[in-house]
Image (cartoon, coloured by chain):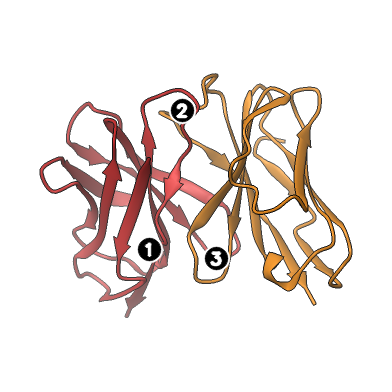
Amino acid sequence: GAGVSQSPSNKVTEKGKDVELRCDPISGHTALYWYRQSLGQGLEFLIYFQGNSAPDKSGLPSDRFSAERTGGSVSTLTIQRTQQEDSAVYLCASTRKGQGAPTGELFFGEGSRLTVL
Amino acid sequence: AQSVTQLGSHVSVSEGALVLLRCNYSSSVPPYLFWYVQYPNQGLQLLLKYTSAATLVKGINGFEAEFKKSETSFHLTKPSAHMSDAAEYFCAVSGASAGNMLTFGGGTRLMVKP
């Protein structure tokens, strides 16, 4: 597709279950970012990929959170043993910039809304 | 390290009135500054960006912002609000060094009254 695609758009899960969120960036974009948007909060940086490697994963809130990227394209964010405080919209963005400093535009997907009951 | 403060989580204006959304930043390196807009149930869309060229930056939909280094501000303005401007607006800062991420402010929800 032409834009950043995220799935699922909505996910409701029970506390303690694992979830996987997928991001398909714009073709040719080497840099990929995950952000979390909680109710009433701004956007919180989670992790950044350059190609398949993650030079900066400093924003992951706990070891229950992990992410990978394969083939320099699709990325999956996994949350294990979900907690209610994990409820948020998880946004993915990509850019062509090779060095990660986004002097250009980040292109965002529409997000995956996660609700943990 | 960078940070962004957006004054006012909610701003309400009448249609046709001036829009002013405030953003102050902190950065240890020369900053790149951005305004993004998020319409309901959509992703973020770039409105405009400052990357050390002209201090007055014009963006889409009639918005503009002025970089004021002395005030560490990058306020967003539009002379005349339209109903379609109702959305959430995010200010963001990035340092110029490689690997530096966008740091976002808390967002300002703009409401436009008829």
Give the image quarter of residue A8: bottom right
The mark found on residue B76 in the picture is none
Residue A117 drawn at (x, y percent):
80, 77
Q: How many marks?
A: 3
Image spot of residue A52 (x, y percent):
73, 24
The chain ID associated with circle 1 is B
Question: Which residue is at a point 59% across and 46% down the rendered structure image?
Answer: A59
B63 left or right of A18? left
Rounded to the nearest angstrom, the CA distance separating label 2 from label 1 is: 29 Å
Q: Amino acid at mark 2?
A: Ala
Q: Residue at x 18, y 44 (%)?
A: B66
Please, is residue B94 above or below residue B96 in the view?
below
Among the chains pictured, the one given orange colouring is: A
Q: Is residue A32 above or below residue A72?
A: below
Mark 2: few/some/many CA within 10 Å (<14, 14-19, 20+): some
**Of tags 2 and 1, which is closer to the observer?**
2
**Chain letter, colour red in render:** B
Disc 3 marks a residue whose amino acid type is Pro
Q: Relative to residue B29, is residue A87 depicted above or below?
A: below
Q: Which residue is mark 1?
A: B85
The answer, for residue A110, to whether it is visible in the render is no
Secondary element under disc 2, as helix, strand or loop, is loop
Residue tagged 2: A101
- The residue drawn where x is 76% and y is 68% is A83
